[in-house]
Amino acid sequence: MQFKYTVTASNSLAQLTAFIENTNTFGSGLRWLNKYELLMNEALLISVNHKICNNLSLKSLGLNCLYFNDWLIAYSIHQNFILIEALLHKSRISD
């Protein structure tokens, strides 16, 4: 199964990686991205338990949620792929 991203989620990931790179040491954005990808492979591709989001708005859309550090990853599961729908800072979410 592969990952796909909505335009919004893809832009958020790119902006987040650039922010981490610009506010920390050289290479920190790439290191963060590698950890993110490792989590995605371990938590989403291997796991059979996918948690429905607690947030009412995300739940009403039928999205699953996973937290990575301070970030919430909202996604949906399809037959041949997992669609990453949003990456949101946890301070913007109320469960």
Image (cartoon, rainbow, N blue to C red):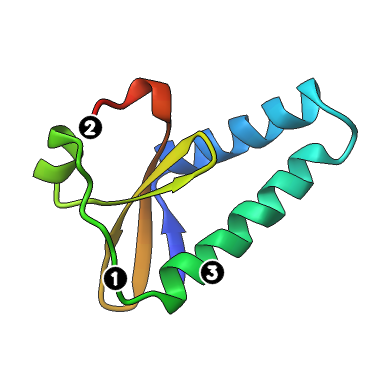
Residue at image location 41% in from the left, 29% down from the top: 90
Q: Residues within 10 Å of mark 2 (few under 14, many from 20)?
A: few
Please give the label number shown on residue 84.
none
What crowding class fits label 3: few (fewer than 14 Cα within 10 Å), some (14-19), or many (20 or more)?
some
Would residue 39 be visible to someone looking at this image? Answer: yes
Which residue lies most toward the left here?
60
Q: Determine whether the residue tagged by mark 3 lies in a helix, strand or loop.
A: helix
Instruction: Name the image quarter holding the C terminus.
Output: top left
Instruction: Residue at 61% x, 37% y: name it.
Output: 14
Residue 1 visible somewhere in the drawing: no
- Disc 1 versus disc 3: nearer the observer: 1
Q: Amino acid at mark 1?
A: Asn
Residue placed under numbered mark 2 in the picture: 95
Residue at 90% from the left image edge and 34% from the top image edge: 26
| Residue at image location 55% in from the left, 40% down from the top | 13
Mark 2 residue element: loop
Q: Which residue is mark 3?
A: 41
On screen, residue 36 versus residue 2, left or right, reads right
Residue at label 1? 49
